[in-house]
Image (cartoon, rainbow, N blue to C red):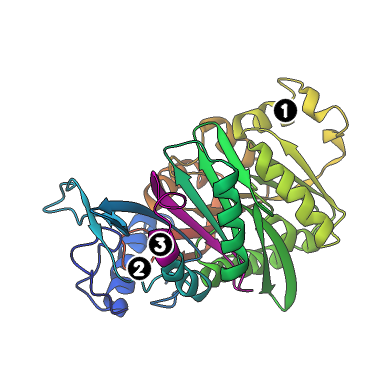
């Protein structure tokens, strides 16, 4: 990716090496962490090196009578630099963002008393189907004048626009975009909400899901348990390979989106429950009863496989103990270090039979990985 801001913008830390070198460095890093548990070669899933990011947030920098998009400065010798750098391009965002963000900035600068006034950030959420939701964040209360001008801009940019300020959310049309992804030769539809979590790299996201499906196909029986299910990103495609599915998630918004996505994809064998990972463990172990589960017969499930996709902190001890009792574990990780830590316990009962690395974030040191474990 060629970008005039490489080396000064803090968004891309690996600006001074070729992409193939970045990928090899990440592969070596993950392989070394997993070496005590898996000695075969990792399956590596690369990304496009530009136009790969479908979610992006930019600060708004005001100077004189103009505002610009800005990002944090590149750290120097590992120390975070104060201040921001104004940017004139961002080749990492996908085309539905790229073709709208600069026209939006021109309109903002032309509207000093309405769109520009006390604007401090802009967030973009886009899809491969050319939908784009733009959220404009303000340090002032938004009024009808702002809504009227933003509504006109929606039509002009062929997008959806929202406004946010302290304790205020203005939805002009819809607060979501509709993504369609071809996964394992099937088309899946996802509503992705402005405040919900979505995978930022659609291309690599599909590869991650297809890798998980490949592991599910090896099982071919029983019920499926998922923790941290989000909007159903993995849940819905994997549901086709199991009898019944129980998926848990703590976020109300994500559960709402997951239920809608089930309906859109005509999937009927998934039950979603709003539970934290620790609560899921307590419920399945019979330690505690939850009103949220009053219509769910937990004893009717015979889980053969579990998928976990935890935050960077990894799994809690209770969840590790719970999933250690299941035959098959698919573990997707956004932090290879905590994955390696958790594998120290999980490999007492299971062996790692497949491992993969996914480069969702080119030009950064961040890397995601996955392992498939089967009971010894």
Residue 273, compared with residue 65, is above or below; it is: above
Give the residues drawn in magenta, as a range: 105-132
Residue 27 circle label = 2
Residue at (45% x, 37% y) in the render? 140
Pointer 1: what residue? 283
Asked if the residues shown at circle 3 and circle 1 are in contact, with their CB atoms under 8 angstroms apart, the answer is no
Residue 184, compared with residue 145, is above or below; it is: below
Question: Which callout, 2 or 1, points at the residue further toward the start of the chain?
Answer: 2
Asked if residue 52 can be seen in this view, the reply is: no
Residue 290, compared with residue 53, is above or below; it is: above
Give the quadrant of the N terminus. Answer: bottom left
Asked if the residues shown at circle 2 and circle 3 are in contact, with their CB atoms under 8 angstroms apart, the answer is no
Q: CA distance from mark 3 to mark 1?
A: 56 Å
Residue 110 circle label = 3
Residue at (27% x, 55% y) in the render? 65
**Nearer to me, 23 or 130:** 130
- The image quarter in which residue 131 lies: bottom right
The reply, left or right, for residue 305 in relation to residue 349 is right
Structural crowding at the residue carrying mark 3, measured as other residues with C-alpha within 10 Å and reported as few (<14), some (14–19) or many (≥20)? some
Residue at (26% x, 79% y) in the render? 18
Q: In x, y percent, where is residue 253?
A: 67, 41
Query: In what element is the residue under mark 2?
Result: helix
Question: Which callout, 3 or 1, points at the residue further toward the start of the chain?
Answer: 3
Question: Which callout, 2 or 3, points at the residue further toward the start of the chain?
Answer: 2
């Amino acid at each position: 990716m060629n970008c005039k801001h490489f080396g000064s913008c803090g968004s891309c830390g690996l600006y001074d090496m070729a992409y193939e070198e970045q990928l090899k460095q990440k592969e070596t890093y993950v392989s070394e962490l997993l070496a005590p548990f898996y000695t075969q070669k990792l399956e590596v899933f690369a990304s496009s090196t530009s136009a790969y990011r479908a979610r992006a947030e930019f600060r708004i920098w005001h100077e004189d009578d103009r505002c610009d998009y800005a990002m944090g400065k590149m750290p120097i010798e590992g120390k975070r630099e104060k201040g921001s750098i104004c940017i004139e391009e961002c080749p990492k965002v996908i085309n539905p963002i790229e073709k709208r963000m600069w026209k939006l900035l021109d309109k903002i600068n032309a509207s000093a008393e309405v769109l520009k006034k006390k604007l401090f950030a802009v967030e973009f959420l886009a899809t491969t189907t050319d939908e784009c939701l733009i959220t404009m964040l303000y340090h002032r209360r938004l009024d009808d004048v702002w809504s009227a001008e933003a509504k006109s801009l929606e039509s002009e940019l062929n997008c959806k626009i929202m406004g946010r300020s302290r304790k205020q959310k203005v939805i002009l049309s819809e607060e979501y975009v509709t993504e369609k992804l071809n996964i394992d030769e099937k088309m899946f539809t996802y509503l992705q909400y402005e405040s919900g979590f979505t995978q930022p790299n659609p291309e690599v996201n599909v590869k991650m899901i297809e890798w998980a499906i490949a592991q599910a196909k090896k099982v071919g029986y029983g019920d499926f348990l998922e923790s941290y299910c989000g909007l159903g990103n993995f849940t819905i495609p994997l549901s086709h390979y199991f009898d019944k599915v129980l998926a848990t998630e703590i976020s109300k918004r994500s559960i709402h989106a997951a239920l809608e996505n089930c309906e859109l994809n005509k999937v009927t064998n998934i039950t979603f429950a709003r539970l934290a990972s620790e609560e899921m463990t307590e419920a399945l172990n019979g330690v505690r009863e939850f009103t949220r589960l009053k219509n769910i017969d937990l004893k009717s499930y015979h889980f053969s496989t579990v998928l976990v996709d935890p935050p960077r902190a990894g799994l809690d001890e209770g969840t590790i103990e719970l999933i250690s009792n299941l035959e098959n574990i698919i573990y997707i990780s956004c932090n290879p270090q905590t994955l390696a830590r958790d594998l120290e316990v999980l490999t007492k009962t299971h062996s790692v039979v497949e491992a993969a690395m996914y480069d969702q974030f080119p030009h950064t040191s961040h890397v995601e990985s996955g392992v498939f474990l089967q009971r010894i």
